Image (tube, rainbow, N blue to C red):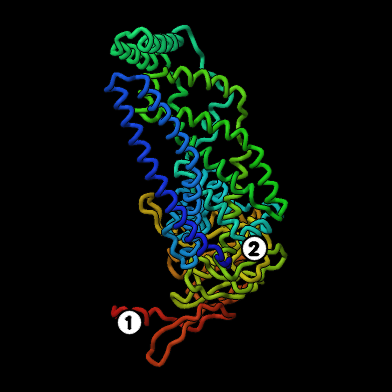
Amino acid sequence: MLEFKNINKLKEDINKYKNITRILSIIRLISLIIFLVFVILLISQNNYLLYGIISFVLFIYLISFVFITNKYYIILKHLENKLKVYNIHLKRRELNLDMIYDDGFDFIKKDDYKSSDLDLFGKHSLFKYLNSTKTKYGRNLLKDNLLNKTQNDNNFSESILELGKTEDTIDIEASLQDFKNDAKKIDYDTFNFVSGNKIKLNILSFIPLISFILTIVYLILIFTIKLNPYYIIIFLVSNLILSKFLLKNDVFNIDSMSYSNLASTYIYVIKTIKNINFKQDYLNKIKDNILKEETNIKSLRRMYLILSIRYNMLINILLNTLFSFDFFIILLFNNKTKKMAKIEAIFENVGILEVLISFSNIAIDNDIYTTPLISDTFEVKDMYHPLVKNCVKNDFKFLGGIILTGSNMSGKTTFMRMIGINMILANCNSLVFASYFKSPILNVYTSLRCNDMLKEGISTFYAEILRMKLINQKIEEEKCLILIDEIFKGTNAVERIQASFKIIEKFNLKNVYFIISTHDYDLCSAKNILNYHFEETYDEANKISFDYKIKEGISESKNALYLLKMANII
């Protein structure tokens, strides 16, 4: 578990910058009020030259002051983001995942049974526990790693380990916090839309420019030969109307505000990782790929920033009234975008970095974890389930097919989920929740939450058949880990036992790793299987307790009647 050495200093810095920005905000407000006073004097008094010059100087001062002092607000925001990340980690250590809003529920697939059986996605899920992704690419990549047997670069797990042992990772996570929720939905091809694009101009497009020039001429004549100043309103209204009707273009319909924010956050991520020295070559390769895009994405952001000014209706009307702003945007757009290259590498590499950070949360927030080893044998030590508070750790050697028995609530299903989750993490070269873990590479298939589907008209037993059909297909194609809870519980005892023996026989022929939990003790006599169990104890007051430790052999206890008595049912 990573020790947070910098958190107290961080809180002090936040208070310091809050005080600085509070003073700066007061100065900004006073400056704005003074500026508005002189603008009113300019409009109401006859001394246009004096008040015009003062207003102009104050305007330049106000813009400059805001620009120069903006860095203090940016620093404060980053510090607050960093504290938020620390708090997320502290909450994760308590298994309180409320601060992690994205649970990946939309990734649950009916035909990929392990996604729900193993709680890979959803309200209290592995995805939610791990998730530090904020972008569309990173989010989908984390999903793909959990759902598919993804053999990442050999340096992948070492990179995760490096990120899990340094508070520099908190800095990167803090920079990712600036990604808005719509970053998970933005289409990257649309984001690149402006690159190499051009707005066509025709003769009518130049009429707003002529109107603007006439406005400037009339304004000069007001100050030189004292023309009636009120007629300038006609020119200003003309500028606005002509701009709106003659300069319509699809570019102006782009969600430039969202794209500007997205580009700004990527730039912020670049700025953050620039100052971090990685040891692993894999991390340095990702860093280099991201930094190469800095110039291009800065150009893209500038363009989107200019376009986003139009999103403020008041400013849009004001600028098109005074300057025929849309015409000059078109000229700037055509000049800049022809030189822009499409951006791709940064999306992919920031996404990979997000996934690495997500997996590094295992090391950051847990005392016990390890890098899995690929082996012909399957053995684990101190393995636990990350989503079970104070989970009892288990050592386990997987020497063949297993029949798992035990009383209700003794830990059978949780144990199977624990095996499944850690196997999935091992498959993608992540860290795992154990002190030692070695295994072959095995795809995981499950039948743990097999219930009827009334909407589709499917009974519990037929739902089990559908799952068993998939498993039957997969054991012909690849090496698998099969996890089945209370096999064929949806049918009668006689046929359940007969069918289960057939399934066990087939699994043994295909040499697959499997765990089948059952209350049918007849299955414990199946050939070529090992028997393991969980058990409970009763104290002097006849109260039940579980140690949740897996043991060799067949369970000798049953507690269904006892639990019914405890509930005052019988």
Answer whether residue 376 is visible to the viewer in this image: yes
Answer whether residue 113 is visible to the viewer in this image: no
Instruction: Specify few, some or many for label 2: CA neighbours under 10 Å numbering under 14, 14-19, or 20 or more.
Output: some
Q: Which of these two is toward me, 158 or 527?
A: 158
State the SS at label 1: helix
> What amino acid is found at the position of numbered circle 1 in the picture?
Lys
Toward the bottom, the furthest residue is 540
Horizontal side of 478 relative to 136 (left or right) equals right
> What amino acid is found at the position of numbered circle 2 in the picture?
Val
In which image quadrant can residue 437 be found?
A: bottom right
Which residue is at a point 50% across and 30% down the rendered structure image? 304
Horizontal side of 256 relative to 151 (left or right) equals left
Q: Find the distance from the CA under tag 1 to the CA under tag 2.
A: 40 Å
**Residue 512: which numbered mark, if any?**
2
- Residue 521 location in percent, x, y? 51, 77
Which mark is in front, 1 or 2? Answer: 1
Count the numbered circles shown: 2
Work out which quarter of the rendered image holds the C terminus and state it.
bottom left
| Chain-order first, disc 1 or disc 2 | 2
Q: Which of these two is toward me, 105 or 557?
A: 105
State the SS at label 2: loop
Which residue is at a point 39% across and 20% down the rendered structure image? 320
Which residue is at a point 44% across and 61% down the rendered structure image? 97
Instruction: Specify few, some or many for label 1: CA neighbours under 10 Å numbering under 14, 14-19, or 20 or more.
Output: few
Q: Give the residue at mark 1.
A: 565
**Residue 167: which numbered mark, if any?**
none
